[in-house]
Amino acid sequence: MDKKKVAVPLVCHGHSRPVVDLFYSPVTSDGFFLISASKDSSPMLRNGDTGDWIGTFEGHKGAVWSCCLDTNAVRAASGSADFSAKIWDALTGDELHSFVHKHIVRACAFSEDTNFLLTGGVEKVLRLYDMNRPDAAPREMAKTPGSVRAVTWLHSDQTILSSCTDSGGVRLWDVRTGDIVRTLETKSPVTSAEVSQDGRYITTCDGFSVKFWDANHFGLVKSYNMPCTVESASLEPKYGLKFVAGGEDMWIRVFNFHTGEELACNKGHHGPVHCVRFAPSGESYASGSEDGTIRIWQTGPLTNDDVDMTTNGKAKVSAEEVSRKIEGFQISDERKIKEEDLADLVAC
């Protein structure tokens, strides 16, 4: 019998406390990058392909719970237990802005057009900061039902997705009105939410479950029970044939997206896995753990022979098409909101 191949990851040391969030940039002219958030208060930037350390962002005075890069990987953002969200120059490491909050910031996300930073946390308030006018007061959305755990953007920045630490469900907000227009129901609090690279799926984790939702019609597409409580999951971005999940049992598992069959179980971390993310190329994924390390696992190059052609090649759905398809979801049939109009809203 052939023995199963044992995956040997690249191990990235540097953090002195648990790694709680990971974020890959899109592919840029200089490659792609990986930023990590840790309870040691110092986010780190790495080469996304090799895992090589590039630099550390120094300035927070508390655990950093969330991190992200903008579309061009020239600015980074982080949310911290020191009641602040910070914007960094990703090229020099300099702190550009610090946005003071009234409580712990658990989540942050740049808009796709890089013009806005979204934050959320224990205050139960979502805030939008205008990156073109960073000194202006942020726009505050209506209060969320609980402390914010995860946030992200979808529908070409016209919709915001958020989850809470103390209640189930994923809430979808219309950016124009600031109102919750839809809730994706889950039994347990959602600890991780990711929008697929092609805009088709929302991947969530709650309790022992990984769920995939249609990002345009909001129906539940697939739901799989996991062997342990999962904290994070990520869908392979190129073809969407597999996904990875990690949680309390310290292992990273790879599953077939269509059947839920477990394809691999990678062991190596010495503590619960808090975050997993696929690289934008789909040829590797990273995991961050309570043990303070990041591990980058190779999946190998994907080819067209691996692809179920019935699921490949579908174009990203535009916000205009979404508005025509979803009953009761108030998105304009016109083109995307002009930047100056949205800036006026933020200034309100």
Image (tube, grey):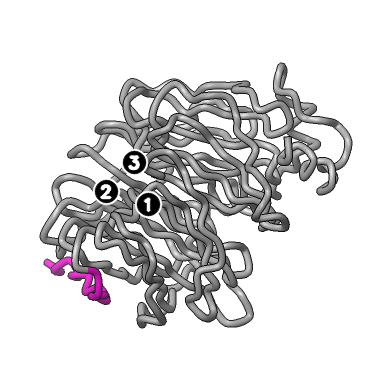
The residue that disc 1 covers is 80
Instruction: Decide: is 132 above or below 338.
Output: below
Which class describes the residues within 10 Å of circle 1: few (<14), some (14-19), or many (20+)? Answer: many
Q: Of marks 1 and 3, which one's residue comes earlier in the chain? A: 1
Residue at (43% x, 69% y) in the render: 34
Where does the magenta region start and end? 1-15
The residue that disc 2 covers is 262
Q: Of marks 2 and 1, which one's residue comes earlier in the chain? A: 1
Amino acid carrying mark 3 in the image? Gly
Q: Position of residue 302 (x, y in %)?
A: 48, 68
Q: Position of residue 324 (x, y in %)?
A: 79, 27
User: Which is in the foreground here, disc 1 or disc 3?
Assistant: 1
Q: Position of residue 58 (x, y in %)?
A: 38, 71
Residue 2 among those drawn in magenta? yes
At numbered mark 3, what does the secondary structure look like: helix, strand or loop?
Answer: loop
At numbered mark 2, what does the secondary structure look like: helix, strand or loop?
Answer: strand
Kindly identify which numbered label has been placed on residue 185: none
The residue that disc 3 covers is 260
